[in-house]
């Protein structure tokens, strides 16, 4: 198992403050996701979206398969979901990747 890493995030949207705090670490060997698996669906994305000057933009990207490792986390605080959304009482799906090199093409309008 790898060393624990600490992650915190705070955001303010529509006058509502939300925060997330966790410690996490890899918990196994790295390997690419199997084609057709949920992990493959969640990680093999080849475009990204971002807001730039108030407009939604899109860019093509290219990367090798993600070297995914199983992971474990200790979530100390999660106020990200709005009050009307209740998270299920199941463990989250967790993966870790130490590094992923990505080629990114220029942003353009998302059509």
Image (spheres, helix red, strand yellow):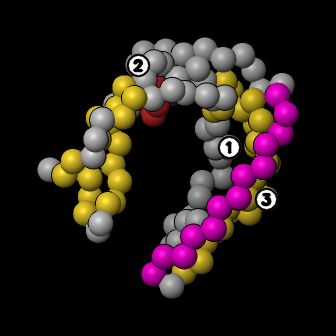
Q: Earlier in the sequence, mark 3 or mark 2?
A: 2
Residue 3 in magenta stretch: yes
Q: Which mark is residue 27?
A: none
Q: Which residue was labeled with disc 3?
A: 76
Q: Which mark is residue 91?
A: 1
Q: Residues within 10 Å of mark 1 (few under 14, many from 20)?
A: few
Q: Residue 50: within the magenta? A: no
Residue depicted at x 74% and y 63%:
77
**57 left or right, relative to 100:** left
Label 2 sits on residue: 36
Give the farthest residue toward the front: 106
Residue at left offset 26%, top offset 53%: 57
Contact between marks 1 and 2 (CB within 8 A): the answer is no
Horizontal arrangement in the rendering, residue 107 relative to residue 41 (left or right): left
Residue toward you, 94 or 105: 105
Q: Earlier in the sequence, mark 1 or mark 2?
A: 2
**Magenta-highlighted stretch: main secondary structure?**
strand
Quadrant of the rendered structure where residue 105 is?
top left
**Label 3: how many residues lie within 10 Å, few (<14), some (14-19) or many (20+)?**
few
**What is the magenta range?**
2-14
Q: Is residue 79 above or below residue 51?
A: below
Instruction: Residue at 66% x, 24% y: name it.
Output: 69
Query: Of 72 and 48, which appears nearest the observer?
Result: 48
- Residue 102 x %, y %: 45, 29
Tag 2 secondary structure: loop
- The earlier-in-sequence mark between 3 and 1 is 3
Q: Secondary structure at mark 3?
A: strand
Image location (x, y in percent) of residue 29 = 72, 16
* Image position of 9 with respect to 47: above or below: below
């Amino acid at each position: 198992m790898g060393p624990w890493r600490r992650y915190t995030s705070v955001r303010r949207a529509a006058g509502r403050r939300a925060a997330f705090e966790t410690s996490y670490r890899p918990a196994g060997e790295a390997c690419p996701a199997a084609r057709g698996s949920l992990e493959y669906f969640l990680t093999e994305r080849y475009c990204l979206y971002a807001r730039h000057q108030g407009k939604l933009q899109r860019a093509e990207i290219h990367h090798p398969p993600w070297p995914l490792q199983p992971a474990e986390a200790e979530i100390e605080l999660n106020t990200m979901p709005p009050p009307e959304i209740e998270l299920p009482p199941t463990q989250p799906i967790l993966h870790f990747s130490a590094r992923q090199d990505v080629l990114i093409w220029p942003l353009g309008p998302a059509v």
